[in-house]
Amino acid sequence: MHRDATPRRYLMCPPAHFRVSYSINPWMDPAKPVDLQLAQTQWEDLRDRYRALGHTVELLDARPGLPDMVFAANGATVVDGRVLGARFAYAERAAEAEAHLEWFRGHGFTEVHEPSHINEGEGDFAVTAGWLLAGRGFRSSPLSHDEAQEFFGRPVIGLDLVDPRYYHLDTALCVLDGDEIMYYPDAFSPGSRAVLRRLFPDALIASSADAAALGLNAVSDGRHVLLPQAATGLFGPLRDRGFEPIGMDLGELLKGGGSVKCCTQELRPAV
Ligand code: ARG
């Protein structure tokens, strides 16, 4: 099957102040040192790779005291040029929401909604052609799902996350193209698994090893799929479907519990 990439616009934030000084997910161990220089180089590789593929990368300034700000996907959800701001579950990240809102207001986005309910942006919202998939269980409030549905006017499918290692939807599920996804079933409750099977019967199913390498924390432009290079089991199945997997090393950022997708917020234009 032939796959076409479409040019995307992404928002990223350099890991200038990245560190693991607290633990809000099982990947984070403040006792493990982080090599900041290496984190910066790995992040730059990702940014440069997007640009080499013809995508636009916008930059948000990192702020001191917000060590997780590099995980820009959590700062908002942008669909049809409309911006649903974030509201973080943990106080440690709360101030990131305002930094994102300021960026959008300063960059010509006029439809910006400050949320009433906790949602961690694209960490828990994934956009397919037909649906807005929405995770809950660890971070985003179920009430944020209705708020998103009302704001975007897209049908929301709520999905229950049950494994603390996969605390955000984007650690367990990735939209590849249109209504095509890949995911790790065991991260979801039995009912949510059944919903996913029903909506996406042809989905690519990830193994526990590939999920544990955070292989689902990936970004697709419709053809190229950038994903953690250690998720080797996903490369063949992606190629079989006509995608071009591109392995990235974001090992330092993995110490914060994030990888490719977490570092990348997609700015979806009005069509
Ligand atoms: N340390 C961050 C947190 O736990 C990692 C966020 C990863 N981002 C993501 N989109 N999954 O909040």
Image (cartoon, rainbow, N blue to C red):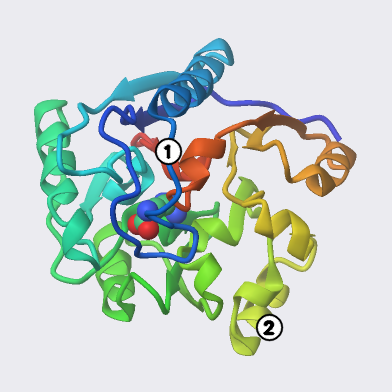
* Front in this rendered view, residue 63 or 270: 63
Q: Is residue 131 above or below residue 264?
A: below
Residue 88 shows in the view: yes
Q: Which quadrant is the C terminus positioned in?
A: top left
Which quarter of the figure has residue 190?
bottom right
- Residue occupying image coordinates x 84% and y 42%: 241
Left or right: residue 153 versus residue 49 is left
Question: Label 1: which residue?
Answer: 34
Q: Is residue 221 left or right of residue 98?
A: right
Q: Is residue 242 left or right of residue 114?
A: right
Q: Residue at x 16, y 44 (%)?
A: 111
Task: Tell me which amino acid carries mark 1.
Answer: Val
Where does the image place residue 16, in percent across and percent down from the top left?
28, 27
- x 31%, y 57%: residue: 152
| Residue under pointer 2 | 194
> Gap in Å between the C-alphas at discs 1 and 2?
39 Å
Image vertical order of residue 225 relative to residue 125, above or below: above
